[in-house]
Amino acid sequence: MMWGWGGMSIGLFFLLIVGLIVYLVIESTRTTKSESIPKEKTPLEILKRRYAMGEINKEEYDRIRNDLKA
């Protein structure tokens, strides 16, 4: 009735497979830092977007851009 080393090695192999599956499932559901933290926009990018959307006119855009670059 005793399996000996053969049965023990099959049990360890099965345990290794189950552990590998658990590890892969955890890694696949885990988010990376770059995905969880939204990218911050620079003031110049925000200004360009506002100008492109028509929120500000050319004169305001130029004035603010010069202020930001100074």
Image (spheres, rainbow, N blue to C red):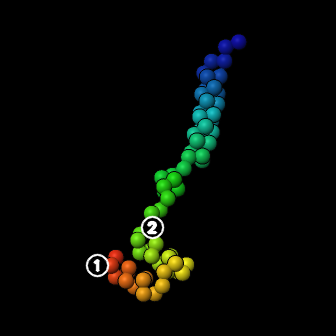
The x, y position of residue 59, in whole percent, is 42, 87
The x, y position of residue 15, in whole percent, is 61, 30
Residue tagged 2 = 41
Which one is in front in this view, the residue at disc 1 or the one at disc 2? 1
Residue tagged 1 = 70
**Identity, as a three-letter code, of the amino acid under mark 2:** Lys
Depth check: give the residue in front, 24 or 17.
24
Residue furthest bottom as drawn: 59
Residue 31 visible to an observer of this rendering: yes
Residue at 43 percent across and 82 percent down: it is: 61
Mark 1: few, some, or many residues within 10 Å (few <14, many ≥20)?
Answer: few
Residue at 63 percent across and 34 percent down: it is: 18
Disc with the residue nearer the chain's start (1 vs 2): 2
The x, y position of residue 52, in whole percent, is 53, 81
Residue 27 higher or lower than 4, as above or below: below
Residue furthest right as drawn: 1
* Residue contact between numbered discs 1 and 2, judged by CB atoms under 8 Å: no
Residue at 60 percent across and 47 percent down: it is: 28
